[in-house]
């Protein structure tokens, strides 16, 4: 009995935790979705009428049901990479399933996945801007004299939010779950209150109203999709945060609380508009009784800050994965919690996001103006995720081809309508996430290609490791062995570390005990401890030189000293004296040359991106006073 109670408590904790981290974005969509649909300033406005209100509410319900409940919760959440989700994890899974000879297919799918990850960076900039701004705009209803302070208050909140990132979110995140429980219960209750005004609005649960709206007013319905898509913003977060909570807690939280409460809010707003069309400018806040409006603005602001926090953390996670997979240089990544591996802070990304979010708020100045930019980021990411998932379902799950084509085709067609509708808003803001994604995509792919060129150049300079060690062993290269232990970090196990070659060629010496540490990134989020290390004597058992291969997942940060302490001394031919060991790093001085493979402007971009790389000693947690850097010039 006690075990059953404990199990239920643990499941409840996970569900509440998921509410605080996973559903902030999609859970605050009711604030701005319907008001955006009926926004009179829209270049393609939806007239307020009984038929249109029923049609929009029904369309929102079935869009959320099909894309979020059926596609994401029912299917996509099952495609995990050892428990981890998100577009980068799905991209890795797809890459593993593409046949070795299908190079073109793999290239196309990888490019598609990287562009999806690039869209997420745009989402990370737009979400805090539209979410916090829409919540603070509640003051226009609750306290009209304060309307002039909406922008300044929003900017202050955003500055505080991003400035607090360096302290970590471990302490504050304990409040996220309970706050979001209160939020969802409150918006559900307010939705019910609105429904009592026009109970007939519940008839919109029938898909016939959505279909009647679509076929009766095809042009109006098509353009309305650009705003209806806001109801599914945050769907990608369900998948991205899979590794933190697991599929079942996320599914339970969605089905038991989030989905029904959000739908009640949408239907309540629809009923309110039917009863009083003058409330269409801000139906969410007009649902709230007068005395509760200010407290609700505060609660809405807290909820949108939580939604922003989730997407900021997601941007940090995507950045770390991109670094580990070779699409970005090593960036400074700080762990803000000694107990939770996912609690990280990337200063460069944080300040870029802060500047971008403030610029967006000051430029657009109203949440409805940002809606089209937001919709484009969401639809692009969803379509790419669906495409990659369908390929994975066919290859990994051996799903029947007719089912993938029929079911997947219908889903992609439905999502394609949202994308097409948002494309009509290009000049009204939808261009923004595409522009951000293109810039991010070019940077990611340029770094990946440039890194391949530099690696090839390095391998020529480094030379084969076995030949170098043979020359030391047989005395062809005279070397004086000095006391102590040296650790040379290397990218692989086939070539000689540049720092080691420089030490021998220029100083004519080498430590008595030498560890060549090869750090490899696996195509999985984490690597089990028992599979972390492999030692190799490299052909000679009497030269005091050994190789240690260390494998890390793409979501793990390699701590070199701690990793070496995991080595069993019995597996080495040398004493493991790490307290006084010297660490040698090979650094590269990049210059633009005539090496083929990149256009001139991309070479300049690659070199500029390299300058943003973090200090290697800090990245690998090496002791500063015992770390030696040795450089080499490489042209690209």
Image (tube, grey):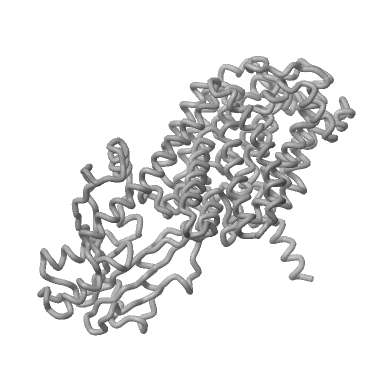
Residue 443 lies, in percent from the top left, at 39, 40
Answer above or below: position of 393 versus 351.
below
Quarter of the figure with residue 148: top right
Please state if 177 lies on the left or on the right of 117 as rendered. Answer: right
Answer above or below: position of 478 versus 207.
below
Residue 150 versus residue 256: which sits nearer the camera? 256
Please state if 61 lies on the left or on the right of 473 as rendered. Answer: right
Residue 238 versus residue 279: which sits nearer the camera? 238
Answer above or below: position of 427 versus 127.
above
Q: Residue at the location (55% across, 42% down)? A: 311
User: Where is the N terminus found, in terms of image quarters?
Assistant: bottom right
Residue 87 lies, in percent from the top left, at 55, 48
Quarter of the figure with residue 228: top right
Residue 579 lies, in percent from the top left, at 29, 71
Residue 75 versus residue 370: which sits nearer the camera? 75
Report whether residue 15 is seen: yes
Q: Residue at the location (28% across, 56% down)? A: 456
Number of marks in the rendered image: 0
Q: Residue at the location (46% across, 33% down)? A: 436
Report whether residue 316 is seen: no
């Amino acid at each position: 009995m006690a075990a059953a109670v404990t199990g239920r408590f643990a499941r409840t904790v996970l569900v509440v935790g998921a509410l605080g981290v996973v559903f902030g974005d999609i859970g605050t969509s009711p604030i701005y979705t319907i008001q955006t649909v009926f926004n009179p300033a829209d270049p393609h406005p939806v007239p307020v009428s009984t038929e249109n209100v029923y049609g929009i509410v029904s369309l929102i319900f079935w869009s959320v049901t099909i894309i979020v409940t059926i596609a994401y919760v029912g299917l996509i959440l099952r495609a995990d990479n050892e428990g981890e989700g998100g577009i980068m994890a799905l991209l890795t899974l797809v890459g593993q399933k593409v046949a070795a000879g299908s190079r073109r297919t793999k290239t196309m799918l990888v490019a598609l996945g990287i562009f999806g990850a690039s869209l997420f960076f745009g989402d990370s900039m737009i979400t805090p801007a539209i979410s916090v701004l829409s919540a603070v705009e509640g003051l226009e209803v609750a306290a009209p004299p304060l309307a002039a302070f909406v922008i300044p208050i929003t900017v202050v909140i955003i500055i505080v939010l991003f400035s607090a990132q360096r302290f970590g979110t471990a302490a504050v995140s304990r409040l996220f779950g309970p706050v979001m429980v209160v939020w969802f219960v409150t918006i559900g209750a307010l939705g019910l209150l609105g429904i009592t005004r026009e109970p007939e609005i519940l008839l919109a649960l029938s898909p016939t109203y959505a279909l009647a709206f679509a076929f009766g007013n095809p042009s109006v319905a098509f353009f309305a999709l650009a705003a209806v898509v806001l109801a599914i913003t945050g769907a990608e977060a369900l998948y991205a945060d899979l590794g933190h909570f697991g599929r079942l807690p996320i599914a339970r939280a969605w089905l038991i609380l989030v989905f029904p409460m959000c739908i009640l809010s949408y239907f309540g707003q629809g009923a309110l508009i039917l009863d009083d069309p003058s409330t269409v400018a801000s139906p969410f806040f007009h649902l709230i009784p007068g005395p509760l409006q200010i407290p609700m603005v505060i609660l809405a602001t807290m909820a949108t800050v939580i939604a922003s926090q989730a997407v900021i953390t997601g941007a940090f996670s995507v950045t770390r994965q991109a670094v580990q997979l070779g699409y970005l240089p090593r960036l400074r990544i700080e762990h803000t919690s000694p107990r939770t591996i996912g609690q990280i802070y990337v200063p460069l990304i944080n300040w870029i996001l802060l500047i971008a979010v403030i610029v967006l708020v000051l430029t657009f100045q109203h949440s409805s103006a940002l809606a089209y930019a937001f919709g484009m980021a969401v639809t692009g990411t969803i379509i790419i995720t669906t495409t990659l998932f369908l390929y994975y379902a066919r290859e990994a799950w051996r799903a029947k081809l007719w089912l993938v084509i029929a079911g997947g085709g219908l889903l992609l067609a439905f999502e394609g309508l949202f994308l097409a509708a948002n494309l009509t808003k290009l000049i009204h803001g939808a261009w923004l996430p595409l522009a951000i994604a293109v810039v991010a995509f070019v940077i990611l792919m340029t770094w990946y290609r440039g890194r391949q060129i530099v690696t090839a150049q390095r391998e020529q300079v480094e030379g084969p490791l076995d030949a170098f060690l043979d020359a030391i062993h047989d005395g062809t290269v005279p070397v004086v062995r000095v006391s102590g232990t040296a650790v040379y970090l290397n990218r692989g196990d086939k070539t000689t570390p540049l720092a080691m070659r420089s030490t021998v060629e220029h100083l004519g010496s080498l430590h008595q005990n030498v560890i060549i540490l090869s750090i490899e990134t696996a195509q999985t989020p984490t690597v089990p401890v028992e599979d972390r290390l492999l030692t190799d004597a490299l052909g000679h058992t009497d030269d005091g030189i050994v190789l240690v291969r260390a494998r890390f997942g793409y979501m793990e940060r390699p701590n070199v000293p701690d990793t070496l302490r995991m080595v069993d001394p019995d597996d080495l031919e040398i004493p493991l004296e790490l307290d006084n060991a010297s660490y040698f790093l090979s650094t590269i001085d990049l210059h633009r040359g005539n090496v083929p493979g990149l256009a001139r402007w991309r070479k300049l971009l690659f070199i500029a991106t390299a300058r943003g790389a973090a200090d290697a000693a800090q990245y690998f947690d090496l002791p500063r006073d015992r770390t030696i850097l040795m450089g080499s010039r490489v042209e690209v």
